[in-house]
Amino acid sequence: MNALLRYQTALLARSQRWLPPFILYVVFLGIGVQSGQPILDSLGYAAAALLPVAAWLVRICVTNEPPAARSCVSAAVGPGRAHLAALLVALGTAVVLGAAGTVVVTLISDAASADHQTRVPRLAAGAAGLLAALACALLGTAVGALTTWPLLRSTGRAVPTMLLAALLSVVVTGSPAQAAVSGLVTGSRSGTVPMPVLPLAAATLLTAAATAAACALTSRRSP
């Protein structure tokens, strides 16, 4: 698996297809996060912006290989393992991107409540933001895994479905991402730092299930 992960990472880096989602995330942060804004609100926004980026990275990693190369890798290690490596590299890239964004937002934001009256511990807020970002990266990976090959082969159907699913994952009540982000926003109003441990656990379970389903279907369907 280590060799597969290195292979997929090198493939992603050389393709430069990671640049558009990277730029999108930077644009999201540039528009929605300003220096001096309440820290928990800004961290919630940064985490939410990561979800569609993670889904996009999954689509990139899964479709990065030419069909002939993918067939060779699948024949050597099994299609399920090859697909899993692509999903893990996408998730790892999203996590690294989200962690970097969380650090920047934590440093430039005002460590205070939404009304700027109550001080908020910066380190604790950063930790909560990192957990929320991880939950969103995981759920974005699940969205990407369920809206690309082998479940959806047509780009015309897969891309709109991915965008709609990413949007719903952020705004629908009951979604782990929505719970993590809304927890930060609510905490900003009271000046308390919530740790989104339960949303993170739920996102982990959902992503594991989505990944298992996608890898199982990959083993049964040829590209």
Image: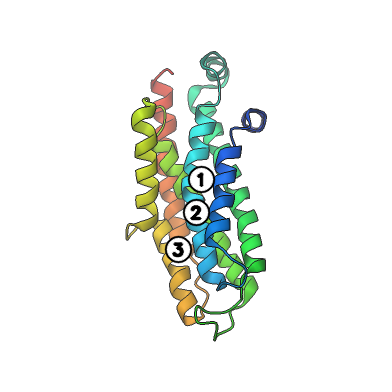
Other residues around mark 3 within 10 Å, as few (<14) / some (14–19) / many (≥20): many
Q: CA distance from mark 2 to mark 3?
A: 10 Å
Q: CA distance from mark 3 to mark 1?
A: 16 Å
Whether residue 88 is visible, yes or no, is yes
Q: What's under tag 2, amino acid-wise? A: Ala
Q: Are marks 2 and 1 in contact (CB under 8 Å)?
A: yes
Other residues around mark 1 within 10 Å, as few (<14) / some (14–19) / many (≥20): many
Q: What's under tag 1, amino acid-wise? A: Val
Q: What's under tag 3, amino acid-wise? A: Val
Where residue 89 appears, x then y in whole percent?
Answer: 58, 37
Where residue 142 appears, x then y in whole percent?
Answer: 43, 43
Residue placed furthest toward the bottom: 117
Quick one: quadrant of the N terminus?
top right
Where residue 176 appears, x then y in whole percent?
Answer: 40, 57
Q: Label 1's element?
A: helix
Whether residue 132 is visible, yes or no, is no
Quick one: quadrant of the C terminus?
top left
Q: Is residue 178 above or below residue 37?
A: above
Q: Which residue is mark 2?
A: 49
Q: Are marks 3 and 1 in contact (CB under 8 Å)?
A: no
Where residue 29 appears, x then y in whole percent?
Answer: 56, 56
Q: Which residue is mark 1?
A: 53
Q: Label 2's element?
A: helix
Q: Earlier in the sequence, mark 2 or mark 3?
A: 2
Q: Horizontally, is 148 left or right of 107 in the view? A: left
Other residues around mark 2 within 10 Å, as few (<14) / some (14–19) / many (≥20): many
Which labelled disc corresponds to residue 167? none
Q: Which residue is mark 3?
A: 181
Q: How many marks?
A: 3
